[in-house]
Amino acid sequence: CLPMIRIPEANSLSFEAEYRRFALKKNGAGSFQEFYQLLQTIHRIPGVDVLLGYADIHGDLLPINNDDNFHKALSSANPLLRIIIQRRDEDEPVVFPTNSLQRRKKGLAGLRPSQQKNKPALLIGLPQDFRQISSIIDVDILPETHRRVRLHKHGTHKPLGFYIRDGVSVRVTPQGVEKVPGVFISRLVRGGLAESTGLLGVNDEILEVNGIDVAGKSLDQVTDMMVANSHNLIVTVKPANQRNNVVHRGSKASAGNGSAGSGGSALSHESAHSPASQTVSQCSNSNSVAEGDSDDDDTDLIIESDNLPSYTPHRSLANGNIHGNTPSSGVFGHRPLPQSVSLPSSSSLPTKTSSSQESMREDGNFITL
Amino acid sequence: MKRFRRHGHDSQRDKLKQELYQFNKTVEHGFPHQPSALGFSPSLELLAIGTRSGAIKLYGAPGVEFMGLHDENAAVTQVHFLPHQVELVTLLDDNSLHMWTLRAHKGVSELLEIGRFTLTGPPGAIPSVTRVTAVLAHSSGELLLLGTEGGHVFVVEVPGFRELEENNISLHESLLPSTHHRWEGQNLECVEALQENPLNPRQVLIGYSRGLMVLWDLDRRCAIQHFLGTQQLESVCWMEDGGNILSSHSDGSYCHWTVTGKDPQTEPEKQETPYGKIPSILVDSGISTVSKLPPFLIFSGGMPRASYGDRHCISVIHSKTHVALDFTSRIIDFFVIRDGERDPNALVVLVEEELVVVDLQTEGWPVIQTPYLVPLHCSAITCSHHVSSIPLKLWERIQAAGKLQNLHYSRKPWPINGGQNLAPDPPQRDLLLTGHEDGTVRFWDASGVCLYPMYKLSTAMVFHTDADPNDNMNQSTEGEWPPFRKVGCFDPYSDDPRLGIQKIHLCKYSGYLTVAGTAGQILILEINDEAAEQTVEATVVDLLQGQEGFRWKGQARLDLREDPVTFPSGFQPFALVQCQPPAVVTAIALHSEWKLVAFGTSHGFGVYDYQQKNNILVRCTLNPNDQVALEGPLSRVKSIKKSLRQSFRRIRRSRVSMRKHNPNNGSCLLWLQLQEINARLEAETLHDMELAPVQRKIEARSADDSFTGLVRTLYFADTFLSDSSQSTPSLWAGTNGGAVFAYMLRLPPVERRMDNKVTAHAGKNSKEIQLMHRAPVVGLVVLDGRGAPLPEPLEVAHDLARSPDMQGSHQLLVISEEQLKLFNLPKVSSKAKLKLTALDGSRVRRVGVAWFGSSRVEDYGESSLVVLTNQGELHVVSLPSIKLQVHYPCIRREDVSGIASCVFTKHGQGLYLISPSEFERFSLSARWVVEPRCLVEAPSETRPTSHSSQVHRDQPDGASMENRICKRLVEFAFN
């Protein structure tokens, strides 16, 4: 069986894009270097330094920069594989965020100090080699004893992997110490997403789920809320272990320093990374909790049986995002690209308009309740 | 800016909301759970029932009912009306007394608690001194006599509860004149009975539990006569002439004493043991006799314990007739209703699970059908279905069929007729259908305050079951002794659990009914005014469609009777679908215009054409890896344990309630043992819980979860499934795994409906939606071009609904447990959504479409969605904008069965079970409210002339006037 790999390409070398589709024998593909040269040849850009990315089955834009992820990319072709080529820009590094092909950032960006909006992101490490699975967010607005953790279930097959229980929380009030019922993490599953981030621990008290206070809610209610938000779960916890807390230095405006492992590199408003976490956080992803409420989560799969089971992905119209990210959906040629992908380096973006018959529609009258 | 602009609109909307929605819990239907006390006021013609949860309910004429709840969470042990007044006194388990009154307010009476009282003994006295065991509401209306466990009788002035210490009757004082050495130095134990002489209200008979009875003169404060019974006393009662006394005893005997004035009387005039003197249980609740020769003698119990200890009997003896009425649950209390001085009219018996009224004037003493307090749970309720606005024609046909079933009831009118029902006639005829564990479907008139039984359908006769259909409950063998006669309809034992009804759908226009059960059976019935003999045509539908490699471990399919069966008039089955595997039917839909029935189980769904009697579609929804759903019901080990525990509880409960203040009787040992076993079981459970703390797994739903293929909802719609120019019939199915399947149906033209096949298109033109959040789909609704829900089948044909708008584009509303989502049709593109779970952690349990009429403008109304969540909250969601309008807390969230039992009407009302035997009715609509409105007036000043009153009443009529004034004063004081 020789699956054909057709690769529509976007090339943005001189603020223009071009698409190429070609076939490749799956078992005939060699190393990453050979493929890199092949692309340069096909696009007639020998010698230009480019970044390669591909869209995986979840719609995430992932890097191709070594043999391993090149082969991973090929194996995920089904049968098409979309590869995006960008010129490597020395000044503005590129990162590959989770759901970057799907999500248009919105939320409370406007609430932030505007001067920070256009600041280029600072980059730590080599983010293009990783996929984001979790992040600490809103360090600047939360009390330092609390931590807001976002778990990106989307790009991983790992289970969320934690349990919660009822418990008693001790609060200090003006009337003295008060005991109130609370919900706590009771167990982390080995190998689960929660454990692998290192950001959540047993006996951490859960304060909020996607921005909603859990005080007064039963264990079952909190469970149901978490399950309902499981695709994009943001939990605010009061860690049982307060020693790894983010320490605020100076004023709130310049808060948000990294914890012990981040080498003291100050970020403007960005979260720090726990040394134990595998996360790479990046600027555009630091929306506050409100994003948890954005309606980009559930992309229902509509299957219309014509003659063949060709699946037409639809999008949630609430925000005009692109969806269709099921393992079985495969015809990338029919899959529209977003008009604005929230990569920080917008100048090097592939600006591809949708060729799909599906029209973008803004659902103006929808109000999230 | 937008926010400011919207403000005006919002306030306008808020005003409109107030005109549309209003939450009220209006009335409780059915039989009170765990009744514990019974009272009756002959002058008001009101019946009162107290329950173990502290509720007090009053019933008079049909529609006249009141309900009150004590603040204390204690059982009501006694209820006494003050004679000839609108007050009543309740005694609770915690020894507190409560005074209630019916006060008229704006032309409607209300039941109000106006006072409470607890006896306080002398300082340092042990609690038993003041523990009330007997209450006598004196006929003067101003005294309450309270007999206690310590053997005292306290006299209290009512309604103000003022202790009249000087009138108290103390044990030793009363004994002084007695020379009988047998009683000296002995504790007489508690006061068992207090009875006023029917002819001389100043004479009161006090019965002590050891057998001694004392006739006391209230004015002279001294004993008139002592009756020295030797057996443990159970109850006493005066004969009508005021000169004879009957006492009942724990050895199964009753004694006849005469008031002679000769003190003391040591031997009874006559002693009788109706059922033999061998160890027998108590003559329980006492004796009631009614003179007029020959007299009626009515008593409960008295049966030899060894052979009939498990029976609950009331014996009625009248000249040569002797019947032991045999009830199916424990007797709480009974009383006799009389018409003035004439013969007894009816015997009213309250047993634990129902109220039975026996007509004593008609030959054979038939039972009178009760218009209220009907035991809904005579077999456990398994599902319910509400149909609003029944056309008169169908209503009359059901009524006629029901009448034929009720021939064994007495034709006498209902004898309790107190109060006036002022509620307006119900605006429409509503039916509530309840499905039961024994395979019956009961039809109730749910239009008004009284839930009245109309008709009962039994599906068991279609199948071969172990039960003998000729087993007649009322059968009694000639010459049998004791002469038992079964009465009452409470029968919780199901012969075959597979017969249990799970889903019901009635088409009110065509008279077609589908009923689906526990073993995958779907019966299709049609109403017929004549009895008919017919065979039921069965079709077996394989929902797995060739999936192999497993073994169904659940129940077997029911066996159909092949020979023709004679069905009585009413709903008669003509077709049967049996799902294979025979799993519980989880969803059903009937379209009487297309003559199709859709059904679903945990394995898949199908569509059956009941015109041509063939199956036209099968779709397996099962995930092949879902072993649990494949093989059938879960492990039985657990359920056996559970049922064992339940049966232990049941035994304990009945023992506890059998005798409250008499632990030194024979059942005590057994009772203690049971209690011990129970305590151990409970401790074990607690221990288990401590070992494994309650924790919840947080995980996204996955396609591999169990029971994702279970079909939760089915819906027929004439809408735009494949293209926007032409609407077609379609079937929609929603599963537990968040999938929605849609099929286009092709129906032949009406004239060739019999011959051409109906087809469902599986390939082209079928659609599937997989909701990303994978929460169970609990409801599907198609909205027409105006955003209104599609009308029911045949509704437009009968001119009862506007025809749907087929010009504008239709929308599909998918209601999952977590959110509501609106899709455009035919493209199935998402349009709007409303999240519930993600925001407050509540999940949708029940959903319905209702029409809310404005209370201000006659012709304005809106269709809305009514949603009940697992938190017990009701939400009203507007259509088609799917926005939350109002929400009200309705049911405790711990009450899972209450939440699961909720049904909505089409006019914004709902019913849910508050106990196995009671429905609570609520209303969300500001326009439609069905609630009791009734008036009870104080009995007229001229008391009903009893043949004795002129002679012996030593109270002038003026006294009652005084009482009345005094009472008013007290009422003001309590205000």
Image (cartoon, grey):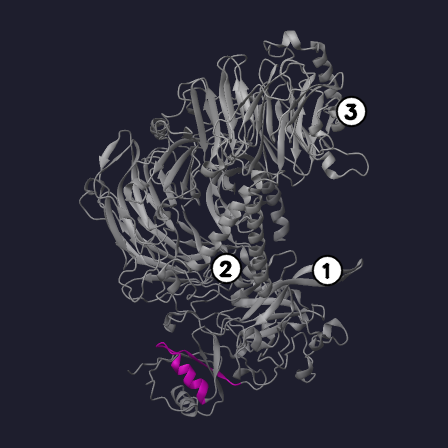
Q: Which residues are magenta?
A: A67-88
| Helix, strand or loop under label 2 | loop
Give residue A318's mark.
Answer: 2
- Distance from the alpha carbon under mark 3 to that under mark 2: 77 Å
Element type where label 3 sits in the image:
loop
Residue farthest toward the front in the current orientation of the protein = B181
Which residue is found at the position 30% from the left and 67% from the top? Answer: B549
Above or below for B543 versus A31: above
Residue that badge 3 annotates: B164
Identify which residue, A67 or B269, lies in the foreground: B269
What is the chain letter for disc 1? Answer: A
Name the front one of labels 3 and 2. 3
Kindly indicate whether the residues beneath marks 3 and 2 are on one polypeptide chain.
no
The picture places residue A65, in percent across and down from the top left corner, at 48, 87
Please tell me whether mark 2 or mark 1 is closer to you in this view.
1
The answer for how far apart the CA atoms under marks 2 and 1 are is 42 Å
Image quarter for residue B777? bottom left
Residue carrying label 1:
A179
The picture places residue B900, in percent across and down from the top left corner, at 48, 48
